[in-house]
Amino acid sequence: MLRSRVTPCLLVQDGGLVKTVKFKDSKYVGDPINAVRIFNEKEADELIVLDIDASVNNAEPDYKMIEHLAKECRMPLCYGGGIKTLAHAEKIIALGVEKVALSSVVFDQPSLIVEITNKIGRQSVVVVLDVKKKTLSSNYNVWTLNGSHNTKKNVVDVIQQVQNLGVGEIVLNFIDFDGTEAGYPIKVIQKLKSAIEVPLTIMGGAKSLEDMGGAVEQCGLMGVAAGSLFVFKGKYRAVLINYPDRQQKEEFIYGK
């Protein structure tokens, strides 16, 4: 039986590691290479690295940075940010990255999902959907470009579209819960999970390992991801890279 992955998500801005709250107020928290080394030592299941500037600035991926990350990383690595063509994706995979993450480009060029999956395999193609609750509604829309652009598309419709195009995995990132450590929105995840046929990872709001374990148990998730939980420690949010050991995962994640 496959066990759910527990995945740190690192945000990169101007070459540095940052953390945001509700996609705003980015705070510098260190060097991404150093963070990767620590997660290596702690034997993290997987690592997601998102360059939050690339797509906003209409820039290509920073291949030099990606190469350094891939060489240092001893766990499966997923990279997203600035990927707009098949050539971009192929180059990133050639640098040693296991998965590429697409976001805003799936609205501009949905056929790119098909192109990339046909070339490198659907298991290596992830779509990250940043979602936010509509005002006076229980429905969620997908936002892009660091939460600055509302696509006005219902997340369920987008999920069905990208699945039909062959994506291998979906990551749902809850904007209003980002960096808050307020807990995952379980009821919303359960509702959206019913529309998802591919492996699903969730991000945004993780407050504890128990919270992660509850989400896995109640929602049947392939992955739970977090940023603040693995970067900050204590009520004063001191920067301290951390990750559960095997015993902690057995107790809090898999033992639920």
Image (spheres, rainbow, N blue to C red):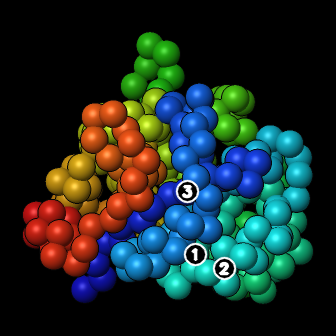
| Label 1 Cα crowd, 10 Å radius (few <14 / some 14-19 / many 20+) | many
Task: Measure the alpha-carbon separation of dots 2 and 3.
Answer: 14 Å
On the picture, is 173 further left or further right than 111?
Answer: left
Q: Check contact, mark 2 vs mark 1: CB within 8 A.
A: yes
Residue 205 in the image: x percent, y percent? 36, 41
Mark 1 and mark 3 lie on one chain; the one further toward the N terminus is: 3
Q: Which residue is mark 1?
A: 77
Point 37% across, 38% down: residue: 237
Point 81% across, 80% down: residue: 90
What is the three-letter code of the residue carrying label 1? Leu
On the picture, is 209 further left or further right than 48?
Answer: left
Q: Which residue is mark 3?
A: 10
Task: Measure the alpha-carbon separation of dots 2 and 1.
Answer: 7 Å
Point 15% across, 76% down: residue: 247
Residue 19 in the image: x percent, y percent? 54, 43
> Which of label 2 and label 1 is nearer to you?
2
Q: Is residue 162 above or below residue 67?
A: above
What is the three-letter code of the residue carrying label 3? Leu
Mark 2 and mark 3 lie on one chain; the one further toward the N terminus is: 3
Residue 15 in the image: x percent, y percent? 74, 54
Q: Secondary structure at mark 2?
A: helix
Q: Secondary structure at mark 1?
A: strand
**Residue positioned most to the top:** 136
Point 27% across, 67% down: residue: 244
> Which of label 1 and label 3 is nearer to you?
3
Q: Which mark is residue 70?
A: 2
What is the three-letter code of the residue carrying label 2? Ala
